[in-house]
Image (cartoon, grey):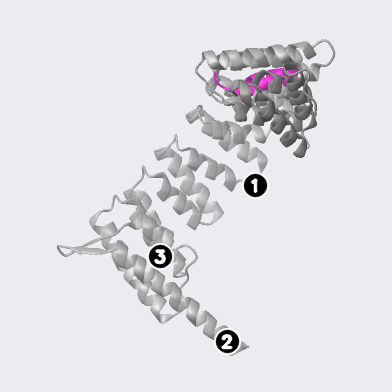
Amino acid sequence: GVGGGVTDLKGLSEARGTVLSLKLAKMSDSVSGQTVVDPKGYMTSLSGLAVSSESDIADFKRAELLLQSLTTTNPGNAPGWIGLARVYKTANKLVQARKTIKRGCEACPDNEDVWLEAAELATPSNARVILANAVRHLPTSVKIWMRAAALESDVRLKKAVLQRALIFVPNSVKLWKAAVELEEEGEAKVLLARAVECVPHSVEMWLALAKLEDYDNARRVLNDARRAVPTDAAIWIAAAQLEEAAGEGHEANVDKIIARAVESLRAHQAVIDRDTWLGHALTAERAGSPLTCAAIVRATIALGVEDEDRKRTWTADAAEFAQKGAYAAARATYAHALKVFPTARG
């Protein structure tokens, strides 16, 4: 009934207060009259807490004094300002929280977390002003640019923020990805072509660009990608899938590409174990590329398998593939086993 609910709430409040007291006791240590606080640990402890009893009020008052002391003696300690602002927010003192984090931004203008906290505590319109100020101090902060873009509900404004961000941080895969996701195919292709110049190590960008191109251009893109990132199997597999998708007259290229992939990756000291390759085969089949799947199986099924273990291992592999519904992989495994052991049955 009602009485039971009140008792439960009281117990919950007391438990919460006890946890907070224990955390504060661990974080505060009186040394020569000074209070030492770990504000980052304290910020974590604030999650989900709310002031709802006199004991909570006492706990939060103590936290306030501890963090006030920290920010007074060491105003350059950004986590201290964030912790103090969160204390006020949790105590439903939002105005005080905003004033506090504003002082934190002034004291620690080169700390992105303080600015992000200030934006989080502000209204959307004020958050825009705060983040605009933040990027003047930290123009290469990806987190701040991403937060600024997230504030905008208008896609055109989101694009404008991200385009501005990429001027300052052209080597951010995260920003490029966010910008590309907002575009239609034609513009996305233009952006991706620029992205692979700025972040040539990003396999994801290369593969996304190849998918938007026609066959000939996609081949060129994937060749460029291999030169830029010679140690990633995904590029070779994408090239094989491209040949498979091209249809009749191209199927023979699939096995050639996968065989070359194994050799090239080994030459570049990119050691990929057998299980990983067979995982790629499974992924290829599920992506609708059974020929690529079978080619991977044929090229890698024997890797690291002792001669005396081959028959047993391959039989188990085929059964496992079949159990997972990967019938192209299972057939390729059985076919390879029968080729090596032509008299084997079952």
> Alpha-carbon neighbours of circle 3 within 10 Å: few (<14), some, or many (≥20)?
many
Q: Residue 170: where, in percent of width, then height?
A: 51, 27
Local secondary structure at mark 2: helix
Which image quadrant for residue 215?
A: top right
Which disc, if any, is residue 4? Answer: 2
Q: Is residue 64 visible?
A: no
Q: Viewer-proximal residue, 52 or 150? A: 52
Q: Split into 4 quadrants, where in the image is the N terminus?
A: bottom right
Q: Viewer-proximal residue, 49 or 188? A: 49
- Answer with left or right where residue 245 lies relative to residue 281: right
Q: Viewer-proximal residue, 38 or 324? A: 324
Which contiguous range is marked in magenta? 231-242
Secondary structure mostly seen in magenta is helix
> Which residue is located at x 54 percent, y 16 percent?
266
Which image quadrant for residue 333?
A: top right
> Which residue is located at x 69 percent, y 18 percent?
239
The correct choice, above or below, for 186 with respect to 119 in the image is above
The correct choice, above or below, for 25 with respect to 211 in the image is below
Q: Residue 147: where, in percent of width, then height?
A: 53, 45
Rounded to the nearest angstrom, the CA distance separating label 3 from label 1 is 30 Å
- Does the CB distance between marks 3 and 1 fall below 8 Å? no
Determine if the magenta segment contains residue 237: yes
Local secondary structure at mark 3: helix
- Answer with left or right where residue 214 lies relative to residue 160: right
Label 1, on which residue?
A: 153
Name the kind of residue labelled 2 in the image: Gly
Q: Is residue 246 visible?
A: yes
Label 3, on which residue?
A: 87
